[in-house]
Amino acid sequence: MSLFVFRQLAICAGLLVLGGGVGWVGNIYLKHPNPSVTANESKETSLNTPVVYRVAPLEQTHTNHNFIAVAVEKVGSAVVRIDSSRTVSDGSNRSSSNPLFKRFFGEETPLPQERVEQGTGSGFITSADGHIITNAHVVEGTDRVTVTLKDGRTFEGKVVGIDPVTDVAAVKIEASGLPIVVLGRSEDLLPGQWAIAIGNPLGLDNTVTAGIISALGRSSSQVGIPDRRVQFIQTDAAINPGNSGGPLLNDRGEVIGINTAIRANAQGLGFAIPIETGQRVAQQLFATGKAAHPYLGIQMVDLTPEMRDRINQDPASKIKVTSDRGVLVVDIMPSAPAAAAGLRPGDIILKINETTVARASDVQNQVEVSSVGKMISVEVQRQGESQVFQVTPGAFPVEEAG
């Protein structure tokens, strides 16, 4: 065999080795045939012998951690168990105004004497001196609250305040140097992102479940608790009784929501209060013991062609609708802020504080982030013309939310 043919075969062999490695680039590297060969010997060898490419495996770094484990490790010690109890007497009219309360404590069993009903929920620590956020229905109407940390320490909890409008509660324990969670932002979420829930479902402490963000901005009526003023995060991370009040995390271990509700008639559907809402309400509760919610005092619906036709064809309707999009004011409470400002049934709300609104939930969101007593501008369409009204929100009558 000639030297030329021999060299061509050697080159082909080298190409075959390289080509075979294309599918697993990163797992191979190329070495000189013999590192101990001198420069002269190497030159001579390259002319007379085929080049051999040795394939060596890439060193693997083995670890038991993934991003979920890292996220849980980051905040797990700041997630607590909340055991609560209340004493109920037969014949007593004592009851909770919160529809989630019965789901949390279960059905009452008639007994001839006083009895103690117990429930278990979750919460998370937001300050080193013992501020804890949980759900209102976890601690509402209770006589005693016990907080248990992951390390086994227990504390008596004081319910600083509850807000049935958002189902958020503030609990305080006397301690210092406590681990705390890191708060994230739910406003940056997208459906399909990871979601991690930590809590004590069914009394099983420190349970971790994971899934994705299924949807955002679910209205209270869609979730089945229409008297709430929350736009819920929907997730398929398993949320069961006992998870209530625990944190919903993103893939970085930041709290993005407060796990609060499950649909009894569905599987794989859980809902969480956005952390911005929970934190805003909790700050008010810790500061004053109550939360003030601004409201305008209007009843409104999303306009669609079907809704327009239904209203126009209703003989009892006192308004005539010409548009098939927007947010229609159908009624206004007497002496409410909206009535005092001059709004009327039949107005179509276009903007709140220069922010365009397309749905009734958009209006509710804009009003919710305003302040009681601080004027807001409401742009409406009335009889085909645009008008702007200055409305001063009042305090939402909490006693009517039940």
Image (spheres, grey):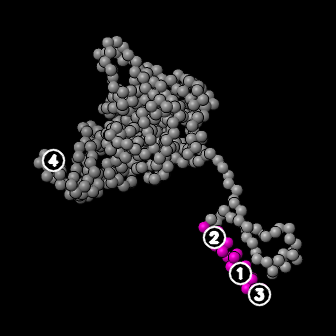
Q: Nearer the viewer, mark 1 or mark 2?
A: 1
Q: Residue at x 37, y 42 (%)?
A: 267
Provide the secondary structure element on which disc 4 rests: loop
**C-alpha span from label 2 to label 4:** 77 Å
Q: Residue at x 11, y 48 (%)?
A: 315
Which tag, 3 or 2, sits closer to the chain's start?
3
Which tag, 2 or 4, sits closer to the chain's start?
2
Q: Position of residue 270 (x, y in %)?
A: 41, 42
The kind of residue on which mark 2 rests is Gly
Quadrant that contains the N terminus: bottom right
The kind of residue on which mark 1 rests is Leu
The residue carrying mark 1 is 9
Q: Which residues are magenta?
A: 1-23
Which tag, 1 or 2, sits closer to the chain's start?
1
Provide the secondary structure element on which disc 3 rests: loop
**C-alpha span from label 3 to label 2:** 27 Å
Q: Position of residue 114 (x, y in %)?
A: 36, 14
The residue carrying mark 4 is 317
Provide the secondary structure element on which disc 2 rests: helix
Q: Is label 3 in contact with label 2 (beta carbons under 8 Å)? A: no
The residue carrying mark 3 is 2
Q: Residue at x 51, y 29 (%)?
A: 81
Question: Residue 8 lies in magenta, yes or no?
Answer: yes
The residue carrying mark 2 is 20
Q: Position of residue 157 (x, y in %)?
A: 51, 24
Is residue 226 at all visible to an observer of this figure? yes
Judged from this view, the residue extending furthest toward the top is 113
Q: Is residue 141 above or below residue 307?
A: above
